[in-house]
Image (tube, helix red, strand yellow):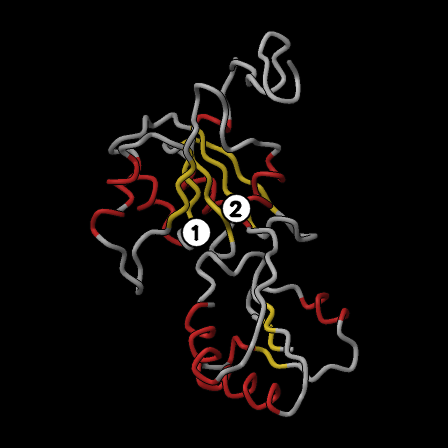
Amino acid sequence: MIYAGSLVNRKILEYAPGAEVHNSAHMDLEEITEIMVNACRAGKTVARVHTGDPSIYGAIKEQMRVLDEKGIPYSVIPGVSSVFAAAAALGTELTLPEISQTVIITRPAGRTPVPPSESLEELARHGSTMCIFLGVHMIGDVAERLMKHYPPDTPVAVVKRASWPDEEIVRGTLADISMKVHEAGIKKTAMIIVGRVLDPGEFRASKLYDAGFNHEYRP
């Protein structure tokens, strides 16, 4: 088992008693893939354990590329992303009729750049629900850039370690969320969710269960 020790709860290791365990937080790509390839060629089963959903900022494709080159078969098992774990913790639906029907999942530029067309300012033009990874350490800058298009009173929630026993939630608006997050001492492993869906007030019910709306299963 090779697990992302900086992000994965160690309790996960209890599901593989007796396994040879490696913490990838201290390893580079070559070290990780070498262990996987050698173990597979020795007839062992390898579990590469990422965060809830490795399809987002999981650095999974570069590992799959190596396995493909080496002819090592694998399967990808989906999990629950911190985006949706955070929404569950907040008791929030990320899309609401006539409030927002689009969810943008993104991250601010850091040591890993983003294309200019995907800057926070550009994405904020849509006014949709936005879920931001890897940005809580620069929450002040994130909020300032979003306010170029979102109103300052736009609701914001920051969820630290969603679904973990020490989960923590901070709510506010773009105008005050930076102060609240700093007061809470949250600096990493947190999801930022922005949008009116967090505090929609009155909103229309969906057509899905509307008694006056017919469809294939309910004429």
As shown in the figure, which amino acid type bears the numbered disc 2? Val
Residue at disc 2, secondary structure: helix
Quarter holding the C terminus? top right
Is 47 above or below relative to 89? below
Residue 40 or residue 79, whichever sits in front = 40
**Which residue: 47% across, 68% down?**
60
Vertical side of 200 occupied by 172: above or below: below
Quadrant housing residue 69: bottom left
- Residue at the (58%, 11%) spot, across then down: 213
- Farthest right residue? 17
- How would you rate the neighbour count of disc 1 (Cα within 10 Å): few for under 14, some for 14-19, many for 20 or more? many
Q: The N terminus is located in which quarter?
A: bottom right
Q: Quick one: 81 or 86, which is closer to the camera?
A: 81
Q: Earlier in the sequence, mark 2 or mark 1?
A: 2
Residue 76 image position (x, y, % from top left): 57, 64
Q: Amino acid at mark 1?
A: Phe
Which residue is at 48% across, 79% downward?
67
Is residue 80 found left or right of 199 in the rendered image?
A: right
Would residue 116 appear left or right of 192 to someone viewing this image? Answer: left
Dot 2 crowding, Cα within 10 Å, few <14, some 14–19, many 20+ = many
Q: Can you give x and y, in whole percent of width and height, for residue 178 in the image?
A: 40, 41
Tell me where residue 42 appears, x and y as whole percent: 64, 92
Q: Residue at x 60, y 90 (%)?
A: 41
Q: Which of the labelled discs sits on residue 133, or is there none?
A: 1
The number of discs equals: 2
Instruction: State the SS at label 1.
Output: loop
Question: Residue 66 appears in which quarter of the rendering?
Answer: bottom left
Query: What residue did someone put label 2 on?
Result: 83
Residue 61's disc number: none
Q: Nearer the viewer, residue 212 or 4?
A: 212
* Residue 12 against residue 82 in the figure, above or below: below
Q: Are marks 2 and 1 in contact (CB under 8 Å)?
A: yes
